[in-house]
Amino acid sequence: MFADPQIIINTDGEAIYYPLVFNGDDAQNLLKELLQNIEWQHDQVIMFGKQITTKRKVAWYAGEGIRYTYAGKRKDPLPWPPFLLSIKEKVEKQTGATYNACLLNLYHAGDEGMSWHRDNEKEIVPESSIASVSFGAPRKFAFKHAVTTQKIELLLESGSVLDMRGPIQQHWYHALPPSKKVKDLRVNLTFRLLIK
């Protein structure tokens, strides 16, 4: 049973939203498992030449030897736990893509977000799918075109998958805007295909 796709962007890349890939009970159970069994750590990033410790927590799971560098810091992979592999397999069936890595983010409440950025690091296979999976509190997600500055916003519901593919990372920025209204936590998994 596949979730019906909603086309969010189809110019200069694609963004396709699949609501309820994981139904309510599955999403709730997986959220508990993610909170208990992922090796969460506060993220360390280099901003304006200084090392900053973020409020949000992160984890990097990937095949052996698949490292990832962003914001000036290198991530060494943790081995896949079985339940995370099962999430990956379901997302692969939904999107028709293949992934060999996952960056997880834990946002404790709405005051934690992510500023405008593009996932265009050299380790990522160019124009490959990046699938963003959401569990927990619904959060607003935004795109902004690099040239036209056109903005598109959508609400990422718990259990949903947002598939970003093609040249979208060249042409569009994306962000998770902070919100004081959101009091609950959200876990986000971004499945990626990295060059081995």
Image (tube, rainbow, N blue to C red):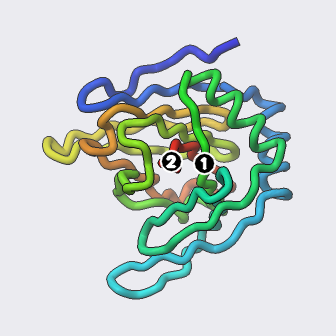
Q: Residue furthest left?
A: 148
Classify residue 118 as left or right of residue 123.
Answer: left
Amino acid type, label 1: Ala
Pointer 2 and pointer 1: residues touching (CB < 8 Å)? yes
Q: Which quadrant does the N terminus fall into?
A: top right
The answer to whether one can see residue 186 in this image is no
Residue designated by label 2: 194
The circle on residue 22 is none
The secondary element bearing badge 2 is classed as loop
Amino acid type, label 2: Leu
Lower position in the chain sequence, tag 2 or tag 1: 1
Residue 96: quarter of image: top right
Classify residue 53 as left or right of residue 7.
Answer: right
Residue 166: quarter of image: top left
Using the image, determine if residue 192 lies above or below residue 79.
Answer: above
In percent of width and height, residue 172 lies at 28, 43
What's the distance in space between the residues labelled 2 and 1, CA to CA? 7 Å
In percent of width and height, residue 126 lies at 36, 41
Residue designated by label 1: 101
